[in-house]
Image (cartoon, grey):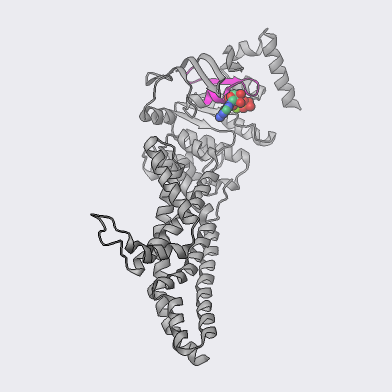
Amino acid sequence: MIRLTNVNKTFDKKPALNQISTEFPENKVTVIVGPSGSGKSTLLRSLNLLERPESGQYQFNHDFDIDFSKPISDKTILKLRQKTGMVFQGYNLFAHLTIIKNIMEGPVKVLHQNKNEARKNALALLDKVGLKDKANVYPSNLSGGQAQRVAIARSLAMAPEYILLDEPTSALDPELELGVLKVLLQIAKEQQSMIIVTHNMAFAQQVADKMIFLEDGQIKFDGSAHDFFTTNNQRIADFISAMTLHEIK
Amino acid sequence: MWEIIKTATPQLISAGIKYSIPIALISFFFGMVLALMTALVRLSHKNRFFLIVKGIFRFYVWLFRSTPLLVQLFIAYFGLPYLTIPGIFPNGIKMSPFLAGILVFSLNTGAYGSETIRASILSISKGQWEAAYSIGMKKMQVLWDIILPQAARISLPPLSNSFISLVKDTSLAASITIPEMFEVSQQIAAQNYQPLTMYCLVAFYYAIVCTLLSFLQSYLEKITSRYTIQ
Ligand SMILES: Nc1ncnc2c1ncn2[C@@H]1O[C@H](COP(=O)(O)OP(=O)(O)OP(=O)(O)O)[C@@H](O)[C@H]1O
Ligand SMILES: [Mg+2]
């Protein structure tokens, strides 16, 4: 379980996260939605410590209890990052490494796995995301959808406790998006803890156990997916329908 | 004329093999080490101590990029013997011409190279750093395993050009009495009174070496372009 308590982050004196307190349950999928600039990415990146909030508590299982107003040791940062895999909107595959090497990089260099073992594991993951035949190809030769599936496999290879996905499909055409979403649904079925930022409401409704709605750096909804999609709150209902129209367009 | 070419060629080639090529290779090696160090220091943002070190490296790059190479060679070989430092160099800093040449060429290559490497590192997208950090890699690991291999690929064409320039610039070492190719061609011309033939001949040999290096560059670029950097 990840628990945030009163987390604040500002950029140039402007608050991006304002008193964020919430929980991300284990073995569940939490979906974060909200308008552009509401702080979704900042929240996700803070969990991976790519962004450093100024204050608040960050509790990760029983392993870490971080006070953002105090310095965080390098060891804690590295360990926490291993436990929170990140999938980026722009894939960010290592351009100079083949697909298989992309996936093996973390296990070999960070977890010090034996190379053969890492390779075997990587091939199994590539199979899982349907790209076994691309093992020796470079990222520049993949479509966006394929690249994102590799990025998902790369994060799974570290066996993280949580996978954080920041708009994993918003750079993709609908046909390519579908392949990625299928992979994510499969992983969700396997009870992988995930936190997903997405604008795709149909997908959110299908995959989410829990929903968070962010606006102006504040949590405006925090509850079950069912409650979110059947809410009486006009602001949220408007947001959902705007997003859904956006999908249709 | 054939007679002249036939007798001069072995001497020129031997001067090239003994001096021009070793000077270029050794200077390029040390220049690249220095360039990488300088680039990394200048890109680091650490504490106050580093600020001073950064200042020193910046001054070094500025100094060598804004003064002529020939003047640098003269200072190192003819000037420094007059610089006495009590305790360390009480009789002035005296170096063999070869050493002075290597020193200046290395420092010069390092200054230009550091700018190339720095720009290449900066051109790698932030996403590459973040992806590497996000799997728990340490800063040095990210740098060596992810960033520098890609930066090296980007730096390859400009650094190859620097090396080719360096090969030609070794001819300036003639001015500090190193008997490299150009110096030898001058000596022969002074004896046989055929400056046109001699200087064209030595130009031809420089051109051959540089052309071979261009081929090598294209080859290296080809084998390293299996991937493209977004
Ligand atoms: N590196 C940064 N420097 C300055 N301001 C930033 C930075 N990153 C984010 N911000 C600001 O913080 C606020 C939250 O940004 P964030 O990227 O988290 O929003 P978001 O919800 O992910 O938006 P989007 O849907 O467009 O991705 C925005 O006002 C943004 O301009
Ligand atoms: Mg965002």
Quadrant of the displayed image that contains ligand 2: top right
At 53% from the left and 85% from the top, the residue drawn is B197
Q: Which residues are magenta?
A: A23-44
**Residue A4 at x, y percent in the picture:** 47, 16
Looking at the picture, how far across and down is residue A79, in whole percent?
39, 29
**Does residue B137 lie above or below A61 as drawn?**
below
Query: Residue furthest toward the right?
Result: A249
Front-lying residue, B109 or B195: B195
Q: Position of residue B192 (x, y in %)?
A: 47, 89
Q: Is residue A77 magenta?
A: no
Q: Is residue B108 above or below residue B188?
A: above
Q: In this orientation, which residue lies closer to the viewer: A202 or A238?
A: A238
> Which percent across, then down, holds residue B92?
29, 61
Q: Is residue A109 visible?
A: no
Given residues A116 and B222, the one toward you in this image is: B222
Screen quadrant of the C terminus of chain B: top right
Q: Is residue A33 magenta?
A: yes
